Image (cartoon, rainbow, N blue to C red):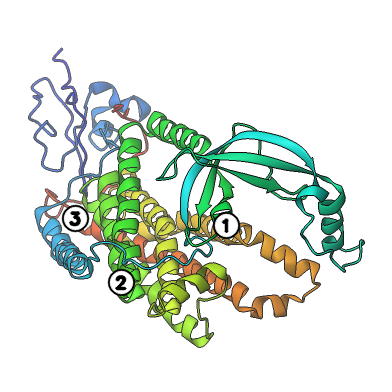
């Protein structure tokens, strides 16, 4: 008996396979009959006389119509697409990428503009220090110059003032460990009710005020958290590489590049006075192109995800611009934004708010568009006979579940970030209407809803684009070949 031809060692992938009847492999069957390594649609099919065993006794007449042969679908890298379709995608994406590159060159700031430090908030000169000695002292001896408060002891202010006069304070000796005054020491008094308590040997961040009297030039403003933060970042990187392997490594590289674009281009360009919306669109587009292609490869699948993300970002920009203007949101709602506006009065704060909406939505958009594109591609691999409508209907059912989870995640993320603010409104017994009407909360509501609308829209947009692309691309399909139904799993799929 002549052995049946075996599938090739390396599995191949296809886009747009058209099913067709197969002849029964007879004694004169050769690897070139039917399917072979050089099959035009990229499938490697394994035929054997035993394929018909699941039919009516394995008769040749049954086997001749049996589609139970093994397909070597590789569900890893995206399947190659036709040259014509690659040209169409390139005709769209290459001008877009060129425009992003030109925009970055034109808007490139060359560094953040300098200014005279005010010594307020984050705009202070800082150095590193370490607590070299710590002793307990009577608060009355170190707070003798303070004017007694008139607040009642039942109020928080009264209780704090009483503790500062009768409680135990800490007197810390701090040594400056960096800068021109390295080795200089100063004394820091820690009140009993202070939220930050110092310990002996603890590393701290100290602020330097050159215009103050010598004894008051240095003060502790924070503790040094570099070691635990670096350790946590190392654990995160190790987990990503351990689970994701090369994909995880490329994702970390893309993350570093994204932060580079943010810190070297977006932030300095806004400080230089460029339009925040234009800078955010150009910067977010650059991050999108670099991150998606670096993590998922230079394939048609990734290109469709890029197009879906771009359409959704444009929708978010239009909706955000309209509703920020309509709701009269200034973007200047707290001490930090007030300090920015004071230092750089030419910055458009409402535009800065819109830029934050666009950049904040980009990360979740990437996840949604890549997932939907992959779902369409895998559905097409599972049943190559599905047309664009069938692919869209099947993939949109996956997208609906994704929408529900992503929107809930986005809302809870913003609620968690604003939890202290929500607690203050709850303590004040404010109604939901008055809370939502305040500009501080209204900004978060607009940010959340505009971003969520863009996420919701990205699912049908990306799904439709992917379904049209993958179903329109049928390289090597024989003309007039009848479409076969889905493979029912009689053949065994080779593992990659």
At x 40% / y 75%, what residue is drawn?
A: 344
Frontmost of labels 2 and 1 is 2
Which label number is shown at residue 272? Answer: 2
Vertical placement of residue 23 versus 188, above or below? above
> Picture coordinates of residue 290 (x, y %)?
26, 52
Q: How crowded is mark 3: few (under 14 residues within 10 Å), some or many (20 or more)?
A: many
Q: Dividing the picture into quarters, in which one does residue 77 lie?
A: top left
Q: What element carries label 1?
A: helix
Q: How crowded is mark 2: few (under 14 residues within 10 Å), some or many (20 or more)?
A: some
- Disc 3 versus disc 2: distance between alpha carbons? 47 Å
Can you say which quadrant of the picture contains the C terminus? top left
> Picture coordinates of residue 361 (x, y %)?
43, 62
Q: Is residue 328 left or right of residue 134?
A: left
Q: Which of 353 and 457 is in front in this view?
A: 353
Count the labels in the image.
Answer: 3
> Picture coordinates of residue 73 (x, y %)?
27, 36
Vertical placement of residue 159 versus 61, above or below? below
Give the farthest residue toward the front: 214
Q: In the rendered image, is residue 121 in sight?
A: yes
Q: Which of 146 and 361 is in front in this view?
A: 146
Q: Name the residue under label 3.
A: 473
Vertical placement of residue 471 versus 59, above or below? below
Q: In the rendered image, is residue 464 in sight?
A: no
Q: Name the residue under label 1.
A: 413
Q: In this view, does 425 lie to the left or right of 25?
A: right
Image marks 3 and 1: residues in contact by CB distance under 8 Å = no
């Amino acid at each position: 008996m002549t052995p049946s031809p075996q599938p090739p060692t390396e599995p191949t992938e296809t886009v747009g396979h058209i099913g067709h009847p197969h002849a029964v492999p007879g004694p004169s069957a050769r690897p070139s009959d039917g399917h072979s390594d050089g099959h035009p649609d990229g499938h490697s099919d394994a035929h054997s006389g035993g394929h018909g065993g699941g039919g009516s006794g394995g008769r040749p007449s049954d086997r001749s119509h049996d589609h139970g042969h093994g397909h070597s679908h590789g569900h890893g890298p995206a399947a190659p697409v036709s040259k014509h379709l690659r040209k169409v995608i390139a005709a769209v994406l290459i001008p877009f990428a060129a425009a992003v590159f030109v925009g970055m060159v034109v808007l490139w700031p060359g560094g953040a503009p300098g200014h005279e430090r005010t010594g307020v908030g984050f705009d202070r000169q800082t150095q590193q220090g370490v607590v070299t000695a710590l002793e307990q002292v009577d608060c009355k001896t170190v707070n003798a110059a303070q004017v007694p408060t008139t607040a009642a002891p039942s109020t928080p202010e009264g209780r704090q003032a009483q503790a500062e006069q009768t409680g135990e304070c800490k007197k810390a000796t701090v040594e400056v460990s960096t800068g021109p005054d390295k080795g200089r020491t100063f004394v820091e008094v820690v009140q009993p009710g202070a939220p930050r308590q110092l310990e002996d040997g603890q590393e701290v961040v100290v602020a330097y005020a050159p215009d103050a009297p010598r004894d008051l030039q240095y003060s502790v403003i924070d503790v040094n958290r570099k070691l635990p933060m670096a350790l946590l970042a190392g654990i995160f990187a190790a987990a990503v590489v351990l689970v994701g392997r090369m994909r995880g490594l490329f994702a970390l590289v893309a993350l570093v590049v994204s932060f580079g674009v943010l810190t070297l281009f977006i932030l300095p360009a806004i400080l230089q006075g460029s339009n925040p919306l234009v800078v955010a669109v150009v910067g977010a587009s650059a991050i999108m192109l670099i991150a998606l292609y670096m993590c998922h490869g230079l394939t048609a699948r990734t290109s469709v995800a890029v197009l879906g993300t771009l359409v959704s970002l444009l929708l978010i920009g239009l909706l955000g611009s309209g509703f920020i203007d309509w709701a009269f949101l200034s973007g200047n709602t707290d001490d930090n934004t007030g300090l920015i506006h004071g230092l750089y009065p030419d910055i458009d704060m409402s535009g800065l708010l819109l830029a934050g909406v666009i950049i904040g939505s980009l990360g979740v958009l990437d996840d949604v568009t890549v997932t939907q594109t992959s779902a369409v591609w895998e559905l097409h691999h599972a049943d190559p006979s599905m047309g664009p409508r069938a692919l869209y209907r099947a993939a949109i059912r996956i997208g609906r579940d994704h929408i529900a989870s992503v929107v809930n995640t986005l809302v809870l993320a913003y609620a968690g970030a604003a939890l202290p603010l929500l607690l203050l409104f709850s303590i004040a017994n404010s109604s939901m209407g008055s809370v939502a009407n305040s500009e501080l909360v209204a900004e978060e509501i607009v940010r959340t809803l505009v971003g969520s609308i863009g996420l919701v829209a990205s699912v049908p947009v990306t799904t439709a684009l992917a379904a049209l692309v993958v179903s329109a691309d049928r390289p090597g399909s024989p003309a007039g070949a009848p479409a076969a139904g889905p493979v029912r799993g009689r053949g065994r799929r080779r593992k990659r």
